[in-house]
Amino acid sequence: MQRMAVLTSGGDAPGMNAAIRAVVRSGIYNKIEVYGVYQGYQGLLEGQIEPMSLGSVADIIHRGGTILHTSRSDEFTTENGRQKAYENLSRLGINAMVVIGGNGSLKGAYEFSRTGIKVIGIPATIDNDIVYTRSIGFDTAVNTALEAINNIRDTATSHGRIFIIEVMGRDCGEIALAAGVAGGAESILIPEIEPNIDQVVTKIQNGMKRGKLHSIIVVAEGALSAMELRKELEEATGQDTRVTILGHIQRGGTPSAVDRILGSCMGKAAVDFLTEGENSTMVASREGRIQSIPLQEIINGTHTPELNMFEIARILSI
Ligand code: F6P
């Protein structure tokens, strides 16, 4: 292998830049020419491919987002689209590629690995919903959500209000669980567990009886509508209730040390796996060590959060 490409795809995640830097620098260290693909899979099939150097990844490890930019491409899900992408890489003599992204991007990586280009995936999504691994970006997103919960707690106490804080995660409750436990939320609602509104109401009422001034309820976006929950809670408790939707704030910001380290280790491992001849696998951080898992297992698996965290949160918020 003499030439390889790297791209980021799907929703950006803090720490992606650390992974790009590690891929580029480990590649160059191994005497491989590295090309950056701009705008994810869409850029790949449009031929937005540029050579990268040691300098092109200088001064990026601390930056959120992705210097290669990203996209969600419908065209790449078609065989025609992937053929165009294959031709663009082949024309430049590139026969290997590292894809940094979430579940949808890894599915694309798996399909693309069947064209003859060697592909290794790196899991990066704030949702932390990729099976068998921790994902780049999750730690930073949880810390961003936690900072918001801390701030909201101040105003919630001052006004004696209920606050519903909606966090991202698509269909996964990982961010809500982690930020909710760390933020001492009274209730956490996640898509993996049927929401029990009566239990939320009882908790608020018991708290009020004990003179508690506020309630913080963390809701994963995939669990239920925060606005409807607000209506139900106001009707049931008579308490002033506000909703804060954190949204894309969770996707940006300077990456935490955890995400920079994960990005660096996974980026180097991806190049090592390619030089060892691997194809169609993903770098995983599992049980404290970096390993490789076939992409086919990843795209066919289903991630479930540690649900004992939900039990911990329930008991600690009595
Ligand atoms: O997958 C990352 C994520 O931020 C999800 O948590 C969220 O549901 C989705 O992307 C939002 O996507 P978009 O940025 O396309 O609105």
Image (tube, rainbow, N blue to C red):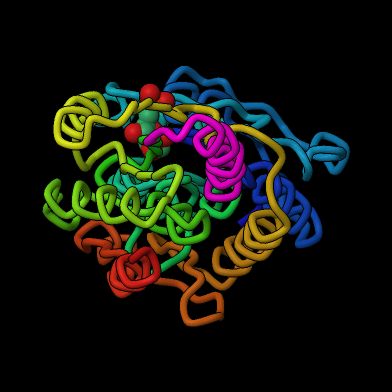
Q: Is residue 239 magenta?
A: no
The percent coordinates of residue 39 (x first, y second) are: 52, 23
Residue 156 colored in magenta in the image:
yes
The residue lying at 67 percent from left, 35 percent from top is 253
**Residue numbers of the magenta segment:** 141-162
Which quadrant of the frame does ligand 1 lie within? top left
Q: Quadrant of the N terminus?
A: bottom right
Nearer-the-camera pick, 166 or 85:
166
Q: Is residue 214 above or below residue 315?
A: above
Q: Can you tell which quarter of the image residue 298 is in? A: bottom left
Q: Quadrant of residue 45?
A: top left
Q: Is residue 242 above or below residue 197?
A: above
Residue occupying the point 20% across, 49% down: 191
**Number of on-image labels:** 0
Q: Is residue 168 left or right of residue 69?
A: left
Decide whether the magenta segment is chiefly helix, strand or loop.
helix
Image coordinates for residue 231, horizontal then vertical, percent: 19, 25
Q: Is residue 281 above or below residue 190?
A: below
Quarter of the figure with the C terminus: bottom left
Q: Nearer the viewer, residue 118 or 285?
A: 285
Name the residue located 52 percent from the left edge and 59 percent from the top edge.
182
In-image side of 137 versus 311 (left or right): right
Q: Is residue 5 visible?
A: no
